[in-house]
Amino acid sequence: MRRITAWRRRPWAGYAVVLAALAAIGVIYAGFSPQTGRAEAESTAQAAQDLKNGQQLFNKNCASCHGLNAEGTKDAKGKPIAPSLLGVGAASVDFQVSTGRMPAMSPGAQFPRKTPIPAFNTEIKTDYEEPAKRKAAEQQKAQAEKNLADLRAYISSLGGGPGVPPASATDPSKGDVALGGKLFRTNCAQCHNFTGQGGALTGGKYAPPLSKSDVTPTQMYEAMLTGPQAMPVFNDTTLTPQDKQAIISYLVQTREQPNPGGNGLGRIGPVSEGLVGWLVGLGLLVMAAMWITAKKPKKLKKS
Amino acid sequence: MSEATATAGATAPKAVEGSLNFIDDRLGSTTFFKRNMKKVFPDHWSFMLGEIALYSFIILLLTGTFLTLWFKPSMNEVIYNGSYTHLKGVKMSEAYASTLKISFDVRGGLLMRQIHHWAALLFMASILAHMLRVFFTGAYRKPRELNYLIGINMFILGMLEGLFGYSLPDDLLSGTGLRITQGVLEAIPLVGTYGYMFLFGGEFPGQDIVPRLYMLHILLIPGLLLGLVTAHMMIMWVQKHTAMPVKNQTEQQVYGYPFYPVFMAKTGAYFLFTFGVIALLGAFAQINPIWLFGPYDPGAISAGSQPDWYMGVLEGALRIMPNWEVSAWGHTVSFNVLIPALVPLGIVFGGAMAWPFIEQWVTGDKRHHHVNTRPRNAPIRTATGIAAVTFYGLLWLAGANDVLADKFDLSLYATTWFFRVTFFVGPFLAFVITKRICLGLQRKDAGIIGHGVESGVILMSPEGEFSERHEPAREEQKAVLLSKENTRPEPPQRDANGIPAAKGPLGHLRSRLNRAWTFDDVPVEEHEHGGHAEIEGGKQSHEIKH
């Protein structure tokens, strides 16, 4: 015991105890943790396979414009045809592919939203009556989701970039609607209109409508984060994740809100109001005037 | 004529005579009422257009009074805590907050707001439609020029009234409009800044603008409008309404129905129709949803920001105007704002006001006119009117160019250039095409009077020749067609002794314009003899050569 007491007072004793404790914990953890080595090896193999699938999808659908290594391509005059995808991140891939903008159909002022190609279409109908049909649809949908995830993983593996936001960050019922309205009017309405009906931009470009239910909260978030096409980037210092969620809440809750005054007339303001005023209002009154003047009194009493 | 006198001579039943006696005992007005109750009103649907304006004005006064009970014309900042959750906790002016209160917390408030706004749109639309009717039928001619001028001024006042009215709620859309108003005021050379400071009482937007616009909107302009409406109606009553050229109608005698009971019943019913249509729109079509626009913030703007339709012309002119600005001696003259604000409406309103007098000067027609002209029988007038409509309509569309570009997938810049070109070309084309159409219709009328109406009966002559039988037009149709006044020959350039008339440059201009007005007129008249008369008789048919 004297020897131990003596060692206890040496300057290195404390370090020795910490080391011993770490070693003991390590040994115990190794004993308890289940098959770590093999599992890791398996998931690495799976990830490599997924990446390979992602790369194959990329080569098949994207590489013709974005280049075999996603480095982007230029035409003979050095004008870019398609941008490099190094560092654009998973959020950008998810936005472009899930809205059907990519793979693009044809070059134009702007790539329109369309139904995604079957390999990436995660919005397909699955509620079939027949079990076989339903199963096939569900399988196809699961495959599409996996394809999209693999493609995202492949592009992120090339150079990082912003990732897909978690569902909790885009939940439209959690944000501050009043704040979102304010932020939307200051930052977004000048292109997308007060209520997100969209609007025209220069040179044939346009801000797409956000008022239809196929624009998902995740897509809104990703658009703000990555600034697709004509849209500027609103990174997390310009609009914090809370701000983004507020804007999403404003958009989704506003588009779901009924119009208390009757038909919303497209919610685009005085242009449609004027049209209705002239065509419906004045039209009905002109018809009434014609009807009234067509009524002739049969006989008038003579004085 | 007997029918006309019979209808004009109808009198009121006993019940009405009794109440008239009551009034007469106190006011001594029997003769006035007796004369006016029988006043004859000509009948045509387009004569009701002005009444829409009158009745929507009444609806505007009533609903407007309701809205003043709750509206607070104040720019004081408040934090909203009403029942519209999407704006809870947002800072806004009291004006905006009280408009939200009217929309969501006052019973029937939203309906009243919507009826008020729809009535305003229809008020302006019907004035414009009424004015077009008056113009194209020549109803503005002597002795009615003054009433015509009063009408145009009411439209201009209505534009101001509307602008001030929709600016009151201090929402983002109307604030944008006020910002443009401020810009236009500032663009006036020399006095612009003073004018802007005078109206806004300081820097834009300031605290004063909404209370000031409120006073103008609910007191001054409605007062002026009410006065002008009264004058308009009284002048119309005294001068009698113009009539369409129909059988029995002459310049000397009005043919139609007496005010009491026929016209009164019709116009009373028409008030109910007007009110019904406006109430239907107010109940089923959402207008000016200020809660969606949000409170005004000078730093925010929305895509598709348009004014109400009657200001759309100004908006369009501003949108297609190139960015011209001149800076000299430390002063800037902003033609890019000044020209769109003044020139297009200056041309339209100035031209409309000057037109009756220009026409009188050119045609030398100083007679009284009580029977309207059919538009085809005054081709220059009709063509000028359509050119003005085209001019106005193109600018109107240009005001919505971003909505057009968005909804019809067009390039925004392409629409701007389209309107820049058609602004100059469109009215000219419209003039030429309309004039041709008018002359074509005159020829058709001349053909009907000359050859009769195609009967659809095909005859075969013994020689085997086919021809269509033409029948004379009905009396009613003839009366309409023959209402055309064929142009009178211009006084000879030289008198009997061969001495040319003394004319200055203006006189020569006048002669040239007069010739342009009349040279291609197609006479519409009945031929008393010749081959056509036989066909008109309908007794036998001959081959008809056109």
Image: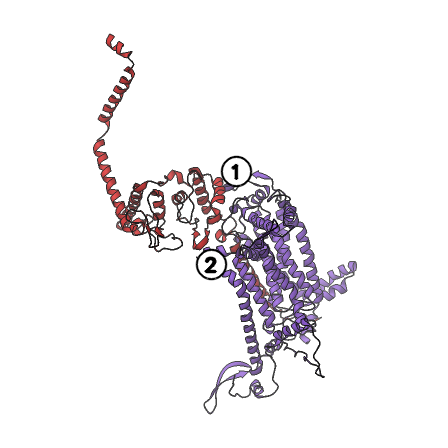
Chain colours: A red, B purple
The chain holding disc 1 is B
Q: Chain of mark 2?
A: B
Q: Nearer the viewer, residue B538 or B20?
A: B538
Q: Is residue B514 left or right of residue A71?
A: right
**Residue nearer the viewer, B353 or A277:** B353
Residue A230, given in percent of the width and then of the height, sits at 42, 49
Q: Which residue is mark 2?
A: B414
Q: In the image, residue B177 lies at what x, y percent?
A: 57, 50
Foreground label between 1 and 2: 2
Q: Residue furthest top?
A: A2
Mark 2 Cα-neighbour bin, 10 Å: few <14, some 14–19, many ≥20: some
Residue at 54%, 76% (x, y): give it. Answer: B440
Which mark, by number, is residue B89? 1
In primary-sequence order, the first of circles 1 and 2 is 1
Please name the residue shown 40% across and 54% down the image: A109
Closest to the observer, B189 or B371: B189
Label 1: state its secondary structure. loop
Q: Are marks 1 and 2 on the same chain?
A: yes
Name the residue type under label 2. Answer: Ala
Left or right: A162 as drawn, with respect to B321:
left
Residue B140 visible (yes or no): no
Question: What is the tally of numbered marks visible in this picture?
Answer: 2
Task: Left or right? Give the position of A156 relative to B519.
Answer: left
Using the image, tell me which numbered label, if any, was put on residue B142. none
Question: Mark 1 belongs to which amino acid?
Answer: Gly
Residue B328, image x and y in percent?
A: 60, 51
Evaluate whether residue B221 shows in this view: yes
